[in-house]
Image: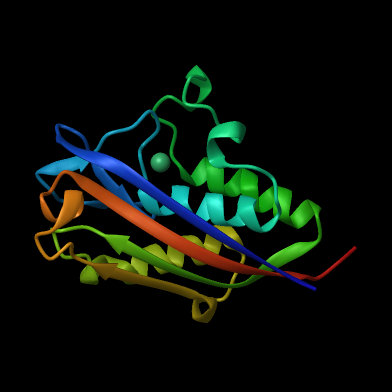
Amino acid sequence: MYRIGLGSDIHRLVSGRPLIIGGVRIASELGAEGHSDADVLFHAVTDAILGALALGDIGAHFPNTDPQWQDAPSSMFLEHTVRFMNERGYAIENLDATIHLERPKLRDHIESMRENLSGIMFADLGSISIKAKTGEGLDAVGRLEAIRASAIVLLRLVAG
Ligand code: MG
């Protein structure tokens, strides 16, 4: 049995905040604003897994009004969610994600992001796809106002 899930996220880009994507800190004049560390990729992947399991969304599980999650590393949200998934007998079949950011270019960081996701999700590197696109100067991404990510996951029932 398989279940599919879709996740997306957006964060405002501001000065004076770190830019952390997929658990990788990236040198940038602008960082992502948010209650946690604002890791847009981890948030989108977390929502995709929750969606596949029909367990609601990241905001319901990890409310941004809860001081517990203030500046929390978003790997915690993903680790919790992977635990929900494992408890229900599912494992990651594959993940495909896209990050939308005008600059800097993310090419040199993609492998580190894949390794981070592979480790947290207990999935082979070959099952983890991450792509990066610019906004071509258009929309909030193109105007350097936002970073966006989308993710789709397929879960496989392995037990229970
Ligand atoms: Mg978010």
In this rendering, position of residue 97 left or right of residue 141: right
Which residue is depicted at the point 30% across and 41% down?
11
In this rendering, position of residue 101 left or right of residue 83: left
Which image quadrant shows ligand 1?
top left
Relative image position of residue 110 (x, y in whole percent): 31, 69
In this rendering, position of residue 100 left or right of residue 55: left
Which residue is depicted at the point 50% across and 55% down?
7
In this rendering, position of residue 27 left or right of residue 97: left
Relative image position of residue 10 (x, y in whole percent): 34, 46
Relative image position of residue 55 (x, y in whole percent): 69, 45
Q: Residue furthest bottom?
A: 126
> On screen, 125 above or below 56?
below
Which residue is depicted at the point 54% across and 60% down?
6
As rendered, which of 147 and 128 lies closer to the eye? 147
Q: Quadrant of residue 5?
A: bottom right
> Which quadrant: the N terminus?
bottom right
Q: Quadrant of residue 108?
A: bottom left
Q: Residue furthest front?
A: 139
Relative image position of residue 92 (x, y in whole percent): 64, 68
> Which quadrant: the C terminus?
bottom right
